[in-house]
């Protein structure tokens, strides 16, 4: 076993050498911009310092976009879900995926893990523990010296004189940061919030019900009966966690009579989908989206075995919950046909919704944003209100307007999250597409800044006067 500090120190020197040989990151080349009162203006503000925020910030700096800042409202080490609300024991992705590598071998998860724990530990590793993934992401951020600030929350964004004004809050103090572009890398939770199924009384939250992706005091469930709605990974992970921490009984209610059997997402996790999805005709995108949406993905077999090990676990397949309401100190579930059940606590394993109108940061702009339902009419038999709520994004993850006149403002906001799935594929939501998504974002944003700053860039070119032939007989001095 390698010494952790010594092994990592040697490896970090290798990372520095790799970056030096690749001339990364290059110097900043964009034109300086000031606000109307002379205030400093960022080129890019990245909101979210989790997996995709780190990837986006790194890729942007590798394009020479250095006037940027990444922020996160969470404390250091708690960005994203991995050590907070993700309740699986390991990542679902295979261990050999590169991670936030951006084409550099020394930045892969495997390279970091072997440097920290040794090659034998890598060979013995089955899947990546959540805490290890969090440590790896923090290491990438540190070793690349990404500009970042924690404990800072974006409250809202609005246009201001050709720029974006981001209202930030830190330690209870609000301030405005001007930026030319904004990247929202806020994960699945940043696409419109948790999904609340029809019939579930919102008044059950927070004392009698909780969403599976939010903080839950499982210790308070000791000796209690817990009902869980849903049959996806979140539902299974919450069921196992509740029982492991003392719940007496978990009843899982699943609408489907048979669980999905094949993870079609695995079958689409290759460069063809990552690179080619954006150029597909809308009708072909929709056809595949509706196919995958109807099938859904199964929970990992590890999550199922983990729950089945608990004697208090019970599952009711083919049992949709039609409603849930408060019944004294309990939750009463309507199971249809005159049947009902009670529980001490309800956990909703029903995932996240896609709804631009519920992204608080974009509240003032949301009515102007184009959705798929605004741009595409599906053929008979493929209608889906849920898929129609996905935003219609440009090729660089940028928002587009229902009215094209709004594009100059909206195109400065990039949704680098699962909200991009319909338009650009699975390159902004899951582990396999990290580098492909970040590189697409950085490439398109660099091109946009170049076009926007072309006058200043041309002026620099014209002023460039480093004499190549000085010292030769053919040197002609200026003038």
Image: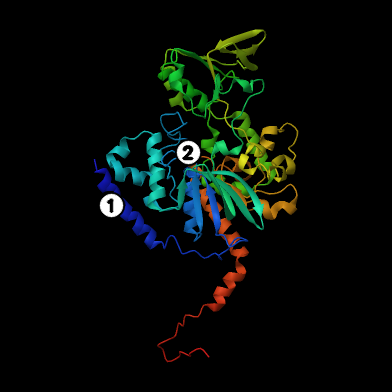
> Residue sitting at 69 percent across and 37 percent down?
388
Real-space CA distance between mark 2 and mark 1, rounded to the nearest whole angstrom: 28 Å
Q: Position of residue 67 (x, y in %)?
A: 51, 59
Label 2 neighbourhood size at 10 Å, few (<14), some (14-19), many (20+)?
many
> Residue sitting at 35 percent across and 57 percent down?
16
Please indicate whether residue 303 sits to the left or right of residue 123 in the image: right
Q: Position of residue 302 (x, y in %)?
A: 43, 26
Q: Position of residue 214 (x, y in %)?
A: 51, 29
Observer able to see residue 435: no
Q: Secondary structure at mark 1?
A: helix
Camera-nearest residue between 224 and 446:
224
Please indicate whether residue 436 sits to the left or right of residue 116 in the image: right
Residue located farthest toward the top when viewing the structure as drawn: 338
**What residue did someone put label 2 on?**
80
Quarter residue 123 falls in: top left
**What residue did someone put label 1 on?**
10
**Disc ID at residue 316:** none
Camera-nearest residue between 408 and 151:
151
Q: Secondary structure at mark 2?
A: loop
Q: Position of residue 364 (x, y in %)?
A: 68, 44
């Amino acid at each position: 076993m390698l010494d952790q500090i010594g092994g990592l120190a040697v490896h970090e020197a290798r990372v520095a050498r790799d970056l030096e040989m690749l001339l990364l990151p290059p110097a900043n080349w964009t034109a300086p911009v000031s606000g109307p009162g002379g205030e400093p203006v960022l080129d890019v503000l990245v909101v979210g310092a989790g997996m995709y925020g780190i990837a986006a910030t790194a890729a942007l700096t590798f394009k020479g976009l250095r006037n940027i800042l990444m922020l996160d409202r969470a404390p250091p080490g708690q960005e994203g879900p991995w050590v907070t609300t993700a309740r699986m024991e390991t990542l679902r992705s295979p261990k050999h995926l590169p991670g936030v590598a951006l084409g550099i071998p020394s930045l892969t998860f495997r390279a970091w893990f072997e440097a920290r724990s040794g090659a034998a530990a890598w060979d013995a590793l089955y899947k990546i523990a959540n805490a290890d993934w969090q440590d790896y992401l923090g290491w990438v951020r540190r070793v690349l010296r990404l500009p970042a600030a924690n404990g800072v929350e974006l409250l809202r964004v609005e246009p201001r004189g050709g720029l974006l004004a981001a209202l930030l809050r830190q330690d209870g103090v609000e301030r405005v940061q001007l930026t030319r572009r904004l990247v929202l890398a806020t994960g699945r939770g940043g696409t419109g919030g948790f999904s609340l199924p029809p019939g579930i009384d919102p008044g059950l939250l927070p004392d009698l019900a909780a969403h599976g992706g939010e903080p839950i005091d499982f210790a308070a469930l000791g000796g209690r009966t817990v009902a869980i709605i849903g049959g996806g990974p979140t539902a299974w992970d919450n069921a196992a966690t509740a029982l492991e921490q003392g719940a007496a009984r978990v009843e899982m209610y699943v609408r489907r009579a048979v669980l999905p059997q094949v993870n079609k997402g695995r079958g689409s996790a290759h460069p063809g989908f990552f690179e080619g999805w954006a150029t597909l005709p809308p009708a072909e995108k929709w056809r595949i989206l509706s196919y995958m949406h109807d099938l859904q993905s199964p929970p990992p077999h590890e999550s199922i075995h983990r729950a089945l090990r608990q004697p208090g676990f019970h599952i009711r397949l083919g049992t949709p919950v039609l409603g849930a309401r408060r019944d004294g100190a309990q939750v009463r579930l309507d199971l249809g046909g005159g049947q009902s059940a009670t529980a001490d606590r309800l956990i909703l394993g029903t995932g996240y919704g896609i709804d631009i109108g519920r992204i608080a940061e974009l509240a003032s702009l949301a009515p102007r944003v184009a959705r798929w339902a605004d741009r595409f009419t599906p053929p008979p038999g493929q209608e889906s209100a849920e898929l129609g709520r996905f935003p219609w994004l440009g090729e660089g993850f940028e928002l587009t307007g229902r009215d094209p006149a709004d594009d100059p403002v909206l195109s400065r906001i990039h949704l680098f999250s699962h909200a991009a799935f319909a338009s650009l594929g699975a390159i902004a939501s899951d582990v396999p597409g990290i580098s492909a998504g970040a590189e697409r974002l950085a490439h398109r944003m660099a091109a946009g800044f170049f076009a926007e700053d072309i006058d200043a860039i041309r002026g620099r070119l014209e002023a460039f006067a480093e004499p190549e032939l000085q010292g030769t007989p053919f040197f002609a001095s200026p003038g």
